[in-house]
Amino acid sequence: MQPERLIIFDTTLRDGEQCPGASMNNKEKLEIARQLSLLKVDVIEAGFPVASPGDFESVRQIAKEIKGSSVAGLARALEKDIEAAARALEKAESPRIHIFLSTSKLHRDHKLQKGKDEIIQMAVDAVKFGRKFCDDIEFSPEDASRTEPEFLAEVVEAVIDAGAGTVNIPDTVGYSVPTQFGQLIRSLKQNVPNIDQAIISVHCHNDLGMAVANSLEAIKEGARQVECTINGIGERAGNAAMEEIVMALKTRKDFFGVDTKIDTRHIITCSRLVSSLTGFFVQRNKAIVGKNAFAHESGVHQDGFLKKKDTYEIMNPQDIGLESSELVLGKHSGRNALSKKIEAMGYQVTQEELDRVFAGFKLLADQKKEVFDEDIVALIQKRKFTDEELNTYTLEKVQGTFESGTTPGATVTLKSRDGKVHTETGQGDGPVDAMYNAIDHITGMTCKLLDYQVMSKTRGKDAQGEVTVRVLHENREVLGKGTGVNTVEASAEAYVNAVNKLLVKTKSGPVGGGEIQGP
């Protein structure tokens, strides 16, 4: 018998971006949307159009370009939100408006201060208003898992009658456990007369570490859409991880009897892209996409694995895009070889971007004996997503004096956009602090360093390091990144990258004020 198909609704660009510190620019969001399209995601929730002009423009660009996947925009049960979503989705091949409204007693009493009848009327009116612009309407009763089951059934029935084709049941604060959440889905199927006229979706948060387990239990009980994110990023402890759900269904098709149309070979590329652009590193032991997910160190495990892979490996690493062999690139490789490699890795680059990556590749190849796949990915991230035309300063040179028992000092040379060269010397508690103080002298800015991380992007003693910094200046927090074999220089690049972002004028904040969240 042919397995039933599960709809994968990816909300990396909306709920994932709400993760503190994970803000992305429009160019980065579009690149992730392209990767999600290659993954063959059914629905891409591109953002919250009413939240800001930047979010609106991001949704508009994604809706205009992406083909083959539905593009969704989130909206509260307010006409201005729904109109903004509709305008942003005008050019979408398959638009969807996703409307949400709180339904739990806690939210009704303290957040909305409205009664049950008012909530149902608001929900119905919002869905009907949305149908004026779009046939594909999804409705989410926010905090559904803590809503009284009888009232939740009333809301679901009402919005389906009003025209919602998908009803999403969010475990908004990750409060449910699998048995309880499965029972909730079962009760809706039993007690909502028109439930067969809509697809039941679930959106589970990971506050208690059960987002994936709750989602899989819901699938067993009849949910046919799951809302999830790459690497499980999202509000607080995050969302259900798409890669874990998809590979659980693929690996245990015998148990779940449900399939997806996801092209799993693009999972690892998408995971690495999201990790790099958000600055959130994937833990080594993370299921499916962690560095150790397909690694075997124990002698007993290695012996069994060499005799028969199935003894200690339940998935084929090639299924998620990992290769047992790799194309080795070195300093004698040409532009065409690099271009083909980038294409094979699933990236799209313009001629100008390829030129920048190739220039960086040649410099790196002179420093390293062998350039690995991870090196190429790091170069793409460094060159492709740097808006060089917006840079106020570029790093020219850094020189330090670091000796035990003395105060570290550093001399930094920056070139400004007008071509002028600026050199300053700084001292600090350590070499990085000294460099950053020197940069502050040049730029005239005083930034507070909130976070500093160095992570090896590749292999060996000559591996590239990626430095990620978070800095605060006048209540603005930005992320800066630098990559290179010389991690001291990469540290300076990361700080200069953050300063350049601070110096670029930003668009206005959320429309209407206040904090806006979603399911």
Image (cartoon, rainbow, N blue to C red):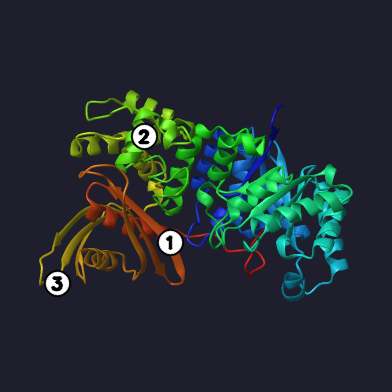
Looking at the image, which residue is at 66% across and 46% down? Answer: 226
Q: Quick one: 517 or 177, which is closer to the camera?
A: 177
Specify few, some or many for label 1: CA neighbours under 10 Å numbering under 14, 14-19, or 20 or more: many
SS for dot 1: strand
Left or right: 46 as drawn, with respect to 192: left
x, y percent for residue 448: 36, 70
Label 2 vs label 3: CA separation? 54 Å
* Amino acid bearing label 1: Val
Closer to the camera in the image, 503 or 234: 234
Residue 349 visible to the viewer: no
The answer to whether the residue labelled 1 contacts the one labelled 3, judged by CB atoms less than 8 Å apart, is no
Residue found 55% across the figure and 48% down from its top = 241
Q: Pointer 3: what residue?
A: 407
The numbered dot on residue 422 is: none
The residue that mark 1 highlights is 478
Q: Amino acid at mark 3?
A: Thr
Of the 4 image quadrants, the one containing the C terminus is bottom right
Circles 2 and 3 in contact, beta carbons < 8 Å: no
From the image, tell me which residue sits under label 2: 304
Badge 1 or badge 2: first in the primary sequence: 2
